[in-house]
Image (tube, coloured by chain):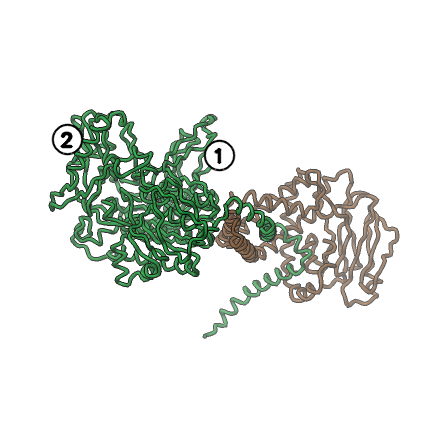
Chain colours: A brown, B green
């Protein structure tokens, strides 16, 4: 997720220019609701370990996916296509001595598979946006882990384009450090061409520490989480927000904090957390992969009961 | 076009939202690296499975290509040079059950059947000798084995159990699993139920298969249970319904009078407001015998005078008068995790004044059949997946419901036409997949429609609508049989188009027998009583079934089934009194003499043309199971309905007023089938049982010595290749 902004190429800037405002407005409404719902959900699930919670979430997502799929896709057409694929697969077995029939059946299988893909587009598009929001909420708890005492914390503030160098040298590089975090050197490292100011901090003790950037009325806050490494399970349910502000995509992926006001000199503020791994059955797997596989497995298990064709 | 500014203003915000959603989706989809991860579970479903299918197909194609040469070598060795001595590459036999030659000739002469006429001109057309008796199970058994009934053991739909004088299905015997495990109230079968084919003899396509020739056999009667062969077989006649019968319909009615129906059951339902709740009765629960029959609750909600909604297992189906629903899958729960699947179609007969709903017999689900109905077993699944559910019941067209007068002619006709349409898909699919080898398909609609609509062709028929209803006015079904022949002609035309593109394929269009009127039924048991050959128990009341009130100690002969008479032979029948040998023969001769030329007192015309002695008309090891005498009725006559099921009535002759008004259970000489061929037929008097040997000869395969049929001389335009067989034929 931290590389999101780097990966997105010119497409984003073109689309963002006319997509940005409505999406920002929409997210201002959606994000608080999503945050509240998921905070509540994680509070309810806090009795279990992060791995167990991930399994439960996968099951819920599997069911949700099936429901959305059922009501947004052309179930009859998908069933027909699936039947055709199965029929042609059987044909390759039944008429295996006839090479022409076998190849014709295989050609039809590929054609039907492509049709299946076409039938998937509509539900895929409809499912995409809510699932991105859903994933970002889960990502807060599983993508990064809080810092541990003694670890180095890398903080980057990016200013809006068009500001003069003075903004970066002056108020833009002001950081109010809370107790519990310390800095080797209070002055940030500034990169004027890319409008950023970097701080290297150290976590002194566990806790949630608000970093306050800027001066006067133009200040922004971002909380840094530091936890005791001995209590790893407890870490699982700490909502770790690594970015505030940024591009439209950043706003979608990191929706825990409110948007940066239009009048602010900051474009975004990032804290570079360490990635977390949530072991499932002893295997260290990225949470997204676990969720991906498990939710599909659950969906396949529930599919016959919910009478959904996928 | 007028423009409404207000309307466009109203729409604008929605369009904007829609555009935003589309753009947002497009935006996220362009950010592929992130999108791939977050699209994950949502679309991962489809994308992953589609890609997997494509990937798997490519792997399969590669495996096929790699292994094909090896398979070809193995096949060549095992197949003993299949097609090396063959005169043709493909033989297609299209069976039109019961096509009557007089009608076919008439319609061809009138120019109404141009395709069959063209086929006759292209190759040839002859009458095709049928079997004694000319019944479909007998005739098709002789067709597929190339032998007389004495060798294939099928003489009728039913045979008689000599131990207790009761009828049983002649072609198949189903036994429950012999090993079971009792767990509380559940009985778990440890082996499969035994389904034994009683038809003897080997289908000629099995002989072809042994020589490496691929065959596709679609719905040829008496192929259930399906036998292994090199190719595919979809079974037909005698495949039971899910309840184990040969077709039991259900008729739901709010009528208070309880009626008994042959071939079906009437279920009384109660209408509460606009809702009717009832159950579909399925098969007995063999896992939990104490539970009785398995049932599925259904609800019908009446929406208007001509619309109701049928709800089954969470699915809804619109019901409109005289319109069939599509096939509905019914899953009967036998126990935890155990279901038995069937398919059924429903038709609303009326909503007011009485609610009436007709449910066809529950067919085995071809996708997951409770019993094997094809070889390989996956073939029935393949067809169901490819073309959707289809009728699997042996006698798929429900003639009984029309015979019982519960639905009208149109409803039955629709059913037949839709079943023929399913068959057509299966046939053309088989043609597509059998570019070399044998393809046989039988259409039964011709038989069923003629059985039920012959009364319209014959205004002297007791069941002609004008005789039953003085106010009768033509209703359009007068041409049902002509329309049927025309439809079949179109089928032949389409088949010719698909098969006769080159000279490698030979097309035969055949029927197993012809058709005629069934105006009067003859109760042979009454005749036997009147002539002193049979006696009833003292005080016996008429109306009994299966000869239960017959005094066997005084009975020398009895009739059961459609085909003929049995002598009550001592040592063979459990209560036999006629000494075998000379006494039995004398009795047979006596009955033959008396029955031959039996006259109908109504018009003094002969009703029985000939009586066949089984010892003279059959040869083979299974001759003893045949009826001792087979009756060759005259045109217009047949055995009476009641005699067939062992009832005794009060008169020898009865008018047949049922819709089942045409039949073919008469003297076989009067009712030959048809034989059209795309190549010139040089042989005179071809017979149905000659076609199997002919097929073997055409493919250059030796004809087994036990076959009674002779290979026909058909001009293939090619000299038989060197080494072609001079078949050893045992003539009948």
Image coords of residue B472 (percent x, y): 19, 55
Q: Earlier in the sequence, mark 2 or mark 1?
A: 1
Check the residue under mark 1 and report the chain it is in: B
Q: Is residue B545 left or right of residue B231?
A: left
The residue where tag 2 is placed is B532
Q: Circle 2 sits in a helix, a strand or a loop, which is it?
A: loop
Mark 2–mark 1 distance (CA, rounded to whole Å): 59 Å
- Label 2: few (<14), some or many (≥20) within 10 Å? few
Q: Residue at x 49, y 69 (%)?
A: B7
In this rendering, the label closer to the viewer, 2 or 1: 2
Q: Relative to B323, say whether B161 is above or below.
A: above
**Figure label count:** 2
Residue furthest to the bottom: B1
Image coords of residue B25 (percent x, y): 61, 60
Question: Is residue B320 something one can see in this rendering?
Answer: no
Q: Is residue B131 left or right of residue B67?
A: left
Q: Which mark is residue B336?
A: 1
| Of residues B721 and A10, the one drawn nearer to the viewer in this rendering | B721
| Of residues B17 and B586, the one drawn nearer to the viewer in this rendering | B586
- Label 1: few (<14), some or many (≥20) within 10 Å? few
Circles 2 and 1: CB distance less than 8 Å? no
Image coords of residue B349 (percent x, y): 30, 49
């Amino acid at each position: 997720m931290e590389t999101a902004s780097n990966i997105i190429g010119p497409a984003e800037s073109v689309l963002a220019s006319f997509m940005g405002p409505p999406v920002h407005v929409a997210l201002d409404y959606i994000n608080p609701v999503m945050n509240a719902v998921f905070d509540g959900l994680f509070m309810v699930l806090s009795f279990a370990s992060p791995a167990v919670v991930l399994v439960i979430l996968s099951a819920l997502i599997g069911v949700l996916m099936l429901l959305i799929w059922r009501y947004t896709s052309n179930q009859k057409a998908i069933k027909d296509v699936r039947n055709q694929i199965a029929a042609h697969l059987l044909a390759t077995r039944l008429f295996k001595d006839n090479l022409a029939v076998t190849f014709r059946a295989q050609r039809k299988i590929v054609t039907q598979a492509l049709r299946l893909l076409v039938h998937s587009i509509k539900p895929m598009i409809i499912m995409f946006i809510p699932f991105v929001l859903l994933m970002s909420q889960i990502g807060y708890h599983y993508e990064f882990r809080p810092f541990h005492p003694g670890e180095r914390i890398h903080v980057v503030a990016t200013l809006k384009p068009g500001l003069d160098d003075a903004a970066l040298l002056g108020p833009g590089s002001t950081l109010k450090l809370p107790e519990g975090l310390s800095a080797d050197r209070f002055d940030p490292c500034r990169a004027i061409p890319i409008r950023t100011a970097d701080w290297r901090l150290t976590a002194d003790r566990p806790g949630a520490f608000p970093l306050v950037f800027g001066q006067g009325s133009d200040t922004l806050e971002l909380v840094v989480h530091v936890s005791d490494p001995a209590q790893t399970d407890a870490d699982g349910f700490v909502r770790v927000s690594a970015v505030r502000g940024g591009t439209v995509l950043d706003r979608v992926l990191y929706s825990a904090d409110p948007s940066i006001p239009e009048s602010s000199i900051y474009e975004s503020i990032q804290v570079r957390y360490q990635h977390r791994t949530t072991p499932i059955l002893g295997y260290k797997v990225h949470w997204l992969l676990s969720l991906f596989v498990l939710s599909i497995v659950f969906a396949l298990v529930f599919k016959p009961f919910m009478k959904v064709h996928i | 076009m007028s423009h409404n500014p207000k309307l466009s203003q109203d729409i604008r915000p929605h369009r904007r939202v829609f555009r935003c959603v589309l753009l947002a989706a497009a935006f996220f989809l362009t950010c592929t690296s992130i999108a791939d991860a977050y699209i994950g579970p949502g679309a991962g479903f489809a994308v992953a499975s589609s890609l997997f299918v494509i990937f798997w197909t490519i792997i399969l194609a590669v495996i096929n290509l790699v292994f094909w040469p090896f398979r070809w070598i193995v096949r060549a060795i095992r197949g003993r040079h299949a097609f090396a001595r063959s005169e043709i590459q493909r033989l297609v036999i299209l069976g039109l059950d019961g096509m009557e030659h007089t009608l076919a000739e008439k319609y061809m002469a009138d120019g109404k059947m141009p395709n069959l006429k063209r086929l006759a001109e292209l190759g040839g057309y002859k009458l095709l000798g049928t079997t004694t008796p000319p019944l479909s199970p007998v005739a098709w058994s002789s067709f597929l084995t190339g032998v007389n009934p004495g060798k294939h053991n099928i003489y009728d739909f039913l045979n008689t159990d000599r131990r207790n004088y009761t009828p049983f299905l002649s072609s198949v015997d189903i036994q429950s699993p012999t090993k079971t495990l009792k767990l509380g109230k559940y009985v778990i079968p440890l082996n499969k139920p035994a389904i034994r084919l009683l038809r003897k003899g080997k289908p000629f396509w099995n002989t072809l298969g042994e020589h490496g020739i691929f065959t596709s056999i679609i719905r040829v009667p008496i192929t259930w249970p399906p036998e292994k062969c090199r190719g595919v077989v979809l079974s037909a006649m005698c495949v039971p319904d899910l309840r184990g019968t040969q077709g039991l319909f259900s008729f739901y009615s709010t009528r208070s009078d309880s009626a008994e129906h042959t071939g079906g059951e009437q279920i009384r339902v109660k209408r509460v407001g606009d809702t009717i709740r009832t159950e579909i009765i399925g098969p007995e629960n063999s896992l939990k015998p104490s539970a009785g029959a398995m049932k599925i609750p259904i609800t019908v909600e009446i929406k208007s005078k001509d619309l109701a909604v049928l709800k089954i297992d969470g699915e809804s189906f619109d019901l409109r008068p005289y319109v069939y629903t599509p096939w509905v899958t019914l899953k009967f729960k036998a126990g935890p995790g155990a279901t038995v699947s069937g398919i059924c179609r429903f038709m609303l007969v009326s909503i007011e004044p009485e609610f009436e709903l007709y449910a066809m017999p529950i067919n085995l689900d071809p996708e997951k059949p409770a019993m094997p109905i094809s070889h390989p077993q996956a073939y029935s699944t393949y067809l169901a997946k490819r073309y959707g559910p289809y009728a699997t019941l042996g006698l798929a067209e429900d003639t009984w419901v029309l015979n019982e007068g519960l639905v009208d002619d149109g409803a039955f006709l629709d059913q037949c036409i839709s079943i023929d349409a399913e068959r057509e898909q299966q046939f053309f699919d088989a043609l597509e997949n059998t570019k070399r080898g044998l393809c046989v398909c039988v259409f039964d609609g011709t038989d069923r429609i003629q059985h039920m609509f012959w009364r319209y062709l014959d205004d002297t028929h007791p069941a002609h609508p004008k005789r039953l209803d003085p106010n009768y006015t033509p209703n359009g079904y007068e041409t049902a049989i002509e329309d049927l022949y025309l439809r079949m002609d179109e089928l032949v035309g389409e088949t010719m188009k698909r098969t006769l593109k080159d000279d490698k394929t030979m097309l035969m269009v055949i029927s197993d027998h012809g058709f005629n009127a069934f105006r009067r039924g003859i109760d042979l048991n009454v005749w036997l009583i009147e002539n002193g050959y049979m006696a009833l128990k003292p005080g016996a009341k008429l109306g009994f079934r299966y000869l239960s009130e017959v005094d066997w100690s005084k009975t020398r002969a009895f009739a059961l089934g459609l085909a003929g008479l049995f002598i009550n032979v001592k040592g063979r029948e459990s209560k036999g009194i006629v000494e075998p040998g000379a006494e039995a023969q004398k009795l047979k001769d006596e009955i033959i003499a008396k029955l031959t030329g039996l006259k109908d007192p109504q018009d003094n015309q002969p009703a029985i043309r000939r009586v066949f002695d089984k010892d003279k008309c059959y040869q083979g090891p299974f001759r003893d199971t045949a009826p001792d005498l087979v009756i060759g009725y005259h045109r217009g006559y047949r055995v009476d309905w009641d005699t067939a099921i062992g009832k005794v009535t009060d008169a020898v002759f009865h008018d047949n007023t049922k819709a089942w008004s045409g039949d073919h259970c008469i003297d076989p000489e009067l009712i030959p089938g048809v034989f059209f061929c795309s190549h010139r037929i040089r042989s005179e008097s071809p017979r149905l049982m000659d076609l199997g040997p002919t097929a073997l000869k055409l493919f250059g395969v030796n004809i087994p010595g036990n076959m009674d049929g002779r290979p026909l001389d058909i001009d293939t335009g090619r000299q038989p290749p060197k080494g072609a067989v001079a078949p050893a034929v045992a003539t009948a």
